[in-house]
Image (spheres, coloured by chain):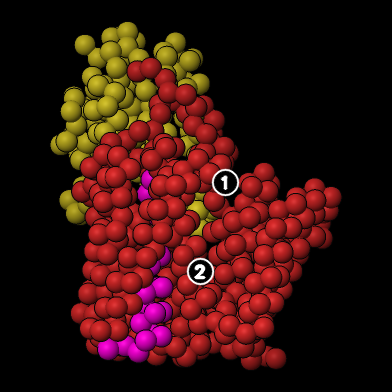
Amino acid sequence: MEQVWFTAASWIGVALMASLISIRTGISVALVEIFLGMIAGNFLGFHSAPWIDVLASFGSMMLTFLAGAEIDPASFRKHLKPSLVIGSVSFLFPFLGAWLFTYYVNGWDWQAAQIAGIALSTTSVAVVYAVMVETGLNETDVGKLILAACFVTDLGTVLALGVLFANFNRWMLVFVLATCLALWMLPRLSRWMFRTWGGRVSEPEVKFIFLVLCFLGALAVTANSEAVLPAYLFGLVVAGVLVQDKVLMRRMRTITFTLLTPFFFIKAGALISLPALAAGAALIALLLAVKIVSKVIGVWPLCRVFQMPLRESNYTTLLMSTGLTFGSISALYGLTRGIITQDQYSILVTVVIASAVVPTFIAQTWFEPQIVVPYEPEFYGTAEHLLHMPEEYQL
Amino acid sequence: MFQKILLAYDGSEGAEKALDAALELARVHQGKVWALAVEENLPHITATVGEFQESKEKANEKFGKLLHAARSRAEKAGVELKTLLRAGHPAKTIINVAREGEFDVILVGHSGLSGVWAAFLGTTAEKVSRHAPCSVLIVR
C-alpha cells in the first residue's frame, strides 16, 4: 500500500509541476504533462500500474465526453449540410492518407496503419476555438460552421476507433442497442435528473454522468469496441442540457483536470520512447506533412465551394489540420491493445503534438484573417461575455 | 490634432502613467480615449474548449476590473474613455486596432525592461512604435 502512495505522490507531483509550468509559460497543461511524462518515463523510470490505467482510461473517457458536450446544437443544426460535408472530408482524407502512407510506404501492418490513419485524422476543436477567439471568427457564421465541422471530424475519429477493431458478435449487438436506447433517453433523463436532484452536496448529477459513462464504456469494451465512442455520443446528445448548467460543467472539468487527465497525459508521455523519436525523426516530419497535405486537398476546395474568402479558406484548412486529444487517445488505444508497437506509438503521438503546434503557427503567422471582434465589450468576467459579445459600437 | 487616442492599458505602472498622459492629451485636444487591454498568454493548445474558456473568463475578470477602474478615473477627470478587450499578441493587436479604428495616436507605457532583456526581447512599446500606422507616444 505504501508503494501505491509513493507512486501516486510522484505522479501527482509531476502533474502539479506541469500546472505551474503551464501557468508560467502559457503552454497548455496537457502538452506540459505529456512532455514531463516523457522525461519521467525515459529518465526516472515512471511506468504505469493497473490503478493508473483505470484513472487514465477514465480521463480519456471524460475528455471525450466533455469534448462532445461542448457542441453548440443550434449552430450545428444551422450549418448542418456544410459542416457534415467539410467535417466528413476533413476526417476521411487524412484517415485514408495516413493509413495508406504508413501501410504502403512505411510497411506498417494493416491494423497499425489504420491506427495511424485514425490518430492523424483528428481536428482539435479546442485549438481551433482558442485560435479563432483572437480574431473574433468564433462569433461569425463562418467560425461557427468551422467549429461544427470539427465536431463531425471528431465523430468520424471515434466511430472509426469504435468500429474498426470491434468484434461483430452478439455483444456488439447488445452494445449498439443499449447505446441507441440510452442516447434516445438520455437527454430527457439527464434534464430530469439535473433538475430534480442537481445542486446537492453529494453531487448526484455527477455520479449519474459517471454511471452512464462507465456502463456504456463497459459494454463497448466487452464488444471489443472503445469506451470513448459512447462517451463522445453521450456528450453530444446532452450538450443542449449541459449548456444550461455551467456550474455542473465546471465541476466536471475540475474533477477531470485535477484527478483524471493528468494520469492520462503523463502516461501518454511516459510511453514515448526517446530513441524511437531520434530514429523516426524523418518519418515524423513526413507523417505531419501527410496530415496537413491531405487536409488541404480535402478541406480547402470545400471551403471555396461554400464561398469562404481565400484567406479564411487557407486559415480554416490549417486550423482543421490541428489535433491533440483524440489523436493521443487513438494512439494510446493502439498501444494498449497491442495493435501498434511502442516505437510506432512514439512517432504517432509526436506527430499529433506537432500537429497541434505547426499548423496553428502557420495559420496565425501568415493566414490570420482581419480581426472581426466588435468594439466596446460591456460584460466582464462571465462566460456569457465570451459567447455573446455586445453590439458593435461606432468608432 | 489627436482626436482619437488609443491607450494600451494593462494596469502596470507604465500603463498608469500612460493613462494620466492620455487623459491630459484628451483634455487639451478635446479628444476621446480608447483604453485597450490585450489578454496575452491565453493557452492555445488545450485539451478541451472549456479549459480555454475558463482561462479566458479569468483574464476577462482581471482586465475587466482594470478597465473599469480606468474608466472611473477618466470620469473623475471629465474625459470620456471607452474600453476594448482583445485576446492576442500585444503589439500586433495594438497595431491592428489602431489601423482598424484609424486612431490619431497610440499611448504606451514604458515596460521597465532594460539591458539584456530589452535588447533580446524588445518591448511592446518598441514594437508598436516600429510598426504603428500613426504617432506613438511612449510614456515613462
Whether the magenta-drawn stretch holds residue B43 is answered as no
Identity of the residue drawn at 33% across and 80% down: A347
Query: Which residue lies under the disc numbered 2?
Result: A158
Q: Which chain carries label 1?
A: A
Query: What chain is colored yellow?
Result: B
Circle 2 residues within 10 Å: few <14, some 14–19, many ≥20? many
Q: Where is residue A179 in the image (x, y as percent from the top left)?
A: 67, 68
Whether the magenta-drawn stretch holds residue A108 is answered as yes
Q: Which chain carries label 2?
A: A
Disc 2 residue type?
Answer: Val
Q: Which of marks 1 and 2 is nearer the N terminus?
A: 1
Query: Which residue lies under the disc numbered 1?
Result: A73
Farthest residue in the left direction?
B130
Residues in magenta?
A: A107-133
Secondary structure under the numbered disc 1 in the rendered image: helix
Q: Main secondary structure of the magenta part?
A: helix
Q: Can the viewer see residue A53 in this picture?
A: no
Identity of the residue drawn at 30% across and 41% down: A308
Instruction: Give residue A140's quadrant in the image.
Output: top left
Query: What chain is colored red?
Result: A
